[in-house]
Image: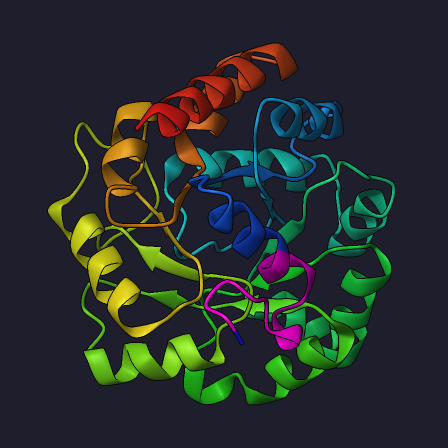
Amino acid sequence: MTPEAPAAVGGVLEAHLRARRHGGQKLLVPYLTAGWRHDWVQVVRAVVAAGADALEIGIPFSDPMIDGPVIQEASMLALRRGVTPAGLVDELSGIDVGVPLCVMTYYNLVFRAGHRRFARSLAVAGVAGAIVPDLPLEEADQWCAEADDAGVATVLLVAPSTPTERAERICRRSRGFVYGVGRMGVTGEQASLAVSAREVARRLRAITDLPVCIGVGVSNAEQAAEACSEADGVVIGSALMRRLLEGGGPDEAADFVAGVRRRLDTA
């Protein structure tokens, strides 16, 4: 297998991101909270049209331990609207935007639905990946097996504090891409990119050939380009969701993502 040949087990998400990387493109993965207002699917389409390589869709949860105030607010708005995980996954089945969709949720929802049922519901909806940040590697085997069987890539996270030996094991078990956590703490915008963001990207690039995307604390186009001096790509969530919570719509979301895309393409 050549360095850019997609491993079959990585599925659609990994194959797509590897192909983009092979073409010399830095990867842009915006995050959007699902269901927080009625036109959220229109925002998804606008963001993809603006240059997203894949999309992370947050399934709202009442106790989002890795999410900061902005995404917490969006999640609470969605829950107050009465959205449910099953209903949101059904909505995703009607979205065909030409790039892979990856859901982000918490293990309580996965466990409640059942590993097999949840994994297969994602697959039926056309979802290519899942991020479950509160499920540790040592307890992930059952979920990962069902996700692999369903063709859903389980994207695992590596923090700045993760020892190298453990990071290697996480990378071996991750599918789709490896999510490098840019800084310790919850999601949210920062005035400058944490030094740890580039450091964790550099460490991961040395131990895995999977695409490495940095998230948590990547706040604008300049910080995205800085992170991508070491990483293959970035995940941007809070900066995008803040603009939407402040009254922006699909056009504003697209403008923000297009600006990041242009900066990455010229970095």
Is residue 191 rendered to the left or right of residue 128?
Answer: left
- Residue 245 visible at all: no
The quarter of the rendered structure image containing the C terminus is: top left
User: What quarter of the picture does the N terminus occupy?
Assistant: bottom right
Q: Residue furthest left?
A: 195
Q: Residue at x 73, y 55 (%)?
A: 127
Q: Is residue 231 above or below residue 262?
A: below
Q: Is residue 91 left or right of residue 213?
A: right
Q: In this figure, which colouring scheme has been used for the structure?
A: rainbow
Q: Quadrant of residue 46?
A: top right
Q: Can residue 176 be spotted in the picture?
A: yes
Q: Residue at x 68, y 76 (%)?
A: 147
Query: Residue 78, located in which quarter of the rendered image?
Result: top right
In the image, 246: left or right of 61?
A: left
Q: How many marks?
A: 0
Give 133 or 182, whichever is nearer the viewer. 182
Q: Is residue 65 left or right of residue 188?
A: right
Q: In the rendering, at what x and y percent does residue 90 appear? A: 85, 49
Q: Does the stretch in magenta take in 211? A: no
Magenta stretch: includes residue 4: yes
Residue occupying image coordinates x 46% and y 25%: 261
- Front-most of 242 and 205? 205
How far across and how far down the image is residue 17, in percent?
55, 52
Instruction: Read off the magenta span.
Output: 2-15
Counting from the top left corner in percent of width and height, residue 238 is at: 41, 33
Image point 69% across, 58% down: which residue? 128
* Rendered location of residue 79, percent (x, y): 66, 42
